[in-house]
Image (spheres, rainbow, N blue to C red):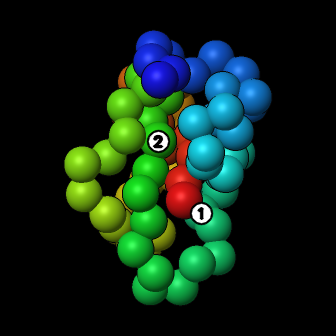
Amino acid sequence: MNTGPITKLQDIADRGFQACRGRMPVTGDRQLEVLFRNGEVSRFTYSAKQLRWSIENHPFDVVGYR
């Protein structure tokens, strides 16, 4: 299992997520599981409009979704 902070785009793909690159994905109201920069996966699901998608170099920046 991959653990630890996300440092490369390949880290996101290796964990089975799609990179968001700092932009909200067009997913409608579909519930998403998200990957944070610190390597943690969300415990809950969220719609895209519930999250902050900008990249601010914070451990809880959303870097990937599925």
Position of 36 compared to 53: left or right? Answer: left
Helix, strand or loop status at disc 2: strand
Residue 13 position, x and y percent, is: 70, 39
Residue at the image point whose x is 67% and y is 33% from the top: 14
Question: What amino acid does circle 1 point to?
Answer: Met
For mark 2, does the 10 Å Cα neighbourhood hold few (<14), some (14 to 19), or many (20 or more) residues? many
For marks 1 and 2, give the CA distance.
Answer: 14 Å
Counting residues from the N terminus, which is met first, the one under dot 1 or under dot 2? 1
**Callout in the foreground (1, 2):** 2
Question: Which of the 4 quarters of the picture holds residue 40?
Answer: top left
Q: Is residue 29 above or below residue 64?
A: below
Residue 55 position, x and y percent, is: 57, 37
Question: What amino acid does circle 2 point to?
Answer: Leu
Residue 45 position, x and y percent, is: 31, 63
Residue at the image point whose x is 66% and y is 26% from the top: 11
For mark 1, does the 10 Å Cα neighbourhood hold few (<14), some (14 to 19), or many (20 or more) residues? some
The answer to whether one can see residue 22 in this image is: no
Residue matched to label 1 = 24
Q: Point out the image quarter for the C terminus.
A: bottom right
The answer to whether one can see residue 38 in this image is: yes
Q: Is residue 56 above or below residue 64?
A: above
Question: Which of the 4 quarters of the picture holds residue 6?
Answer: top right
Q: Which mark is residue 35?
A: 2
Q: Which mark is residue 51?
A: none
In terms of depth relative to the viewer, which is nearer, 2 or 36? 2
Residue 51 position, x and y percent, is: 39, 59
Position of 41 compared to 26: left or right? Answer: left
Position of 47 compared to 65: left or right? Answer: left
Q: Is residue 2 above or below residue 35?
A: above
Query: Which residue lies most toward the left here?
Result: 43
